[in-house]
Image (cartoon, rainbow, N blue to C red):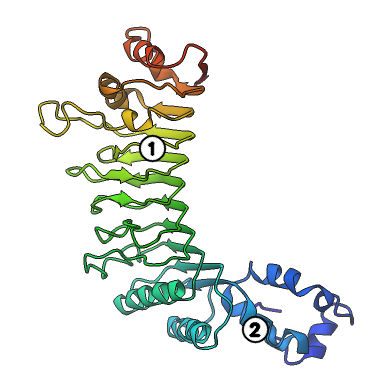
Amino acid sequence: MPPWKAPKNASAATAAVGGRDHISNLPDRVLQYVLSFLPAQDVVRTCVLAKNWRHMWESTTVLRFVCGGTKEPESMGDIQEFVDHLLCLRIRGGAMPLHTCEFRLLQDDEDDMRSTILWIRIALQCKVRVLQLICAGNCRDILSLDVDGHPFFISQYLKKLELQGLDTLPNRLLDFSCCPNLEDLEVDHCYLGDLLLISSQSVKRLNIECCSFGEEWRLPICAPNLVSLWLGVHNGRTPSLQRFPSLLTAFIKIYCYDLVALDSDDESNQSILLQGLSEVQNLVLISLDTCMFIFRRDLKFCSSFSKLKYLLLDEYWCEPADFSALACLLKLSPVDLNIMWRLN
């Protein structure tokens, strides 16, 4: 039976499982857990399975919307109407706050983009705790229409935000001054060159992977309560890390050549990366041979790594022709430091 066609009555659903409805006998919390993995369209369709399923969808705390995919049988207009109606019901009906809301988007129409911005804001009004925005195809500019110069995410309930596949971002999209309880931020395959900053007083875990940064502007990252950092720079200028006094673990991967203008007033006498990591306990530094410049240059402006316990380096820190960067790093580290090597 195709997933988008619901049984006409409860008996059809019962017959599908051999004449006995074992699933409906499960506790509600188990049923809600099962529903949390389904697209929202399928969650709503369960209301016709049996009497005790009739209102189950109304209390779900996880909504996953897939919009614009070629495998989706409904038209884009039908999906838009469905999402609009369902989210409005969440607000008007006084339903339980959302735990997770996922938008997986493939469309590229400007009207669809404006609808998506509205959906995100309604989800925030529903007190969502985990918000996921995953874009593909031609909709990577989904948030480019919102350029009012103010923080985009405003919520005292948001705990985790995941962004993937975005190309054009408002310059204050990752300013979380209005999200005092945000703790997890994941940014994957996005272009961050238009941002003014990444800033949060509450974020504890920050993951930036496979992202491109601007060529002219060095993006500052300010998160004083950060505990874990994963930073992968694949294009553009390496971001500037502010001080992270609570940092336990940092994974830094530089795969692009960042030529710093040594005679510039703003970068000639200050660290870009390493000084911000000076209080980390577990550190991984990975780069290509041509990308070691940023590390070698940064070590000149570091005071010490007094809390460092475990250090993982790749082979380019141990080039036979020049051990100066490695020697400097070890000089700034405790004598009982545990060092590991990653060989390609």
Residue 120 picture location, percent across and down? 41, 72
- For residue 45, the mark is 2
**Is 326 above or below relative to 163?**
above
Residue 146 picture location, percent across and down? 26, 69
- For residue 244, the mark is 1
- Tell whether 197 sits left or right of 189: left
- Tell whether 29 sits left or right of 91: right
Residue 156 picture location, percent across and down? 44, 65
Determine the CA span between mark 1 and mark 2. 48 Å
Residue sitting nearer the eye, 244 or 197:
244
Q: Residues within 10 Å of mark 2 (few under 14, many from 20)?
A: some
**Is 62 above or below relative to 264?**
below
Q: Residue furthest bottom?
A: 9
- Tell whether 32 sits left or right of 98: right
Residue 144 picture location, percent across and down? 27, 66
- Residue at image point 51% right, 72% down: 65
Say which quarter of the image contains residue 47: bottom right
**Is 317 above or below relative to 269?**
above
Q: Is residue 4 among the parts visible in the rendering?
A: no
Say which quarter of the image contains residue 172: bottom left
Residue sitting nearer the eye, 152 or 146:
152
Q: Residues within 10 Å of mark 1 (few under 14, many from 20)?
A: many
Residue type, label 2: Arg
Q: Secondary structure at mark 1?
A: loop
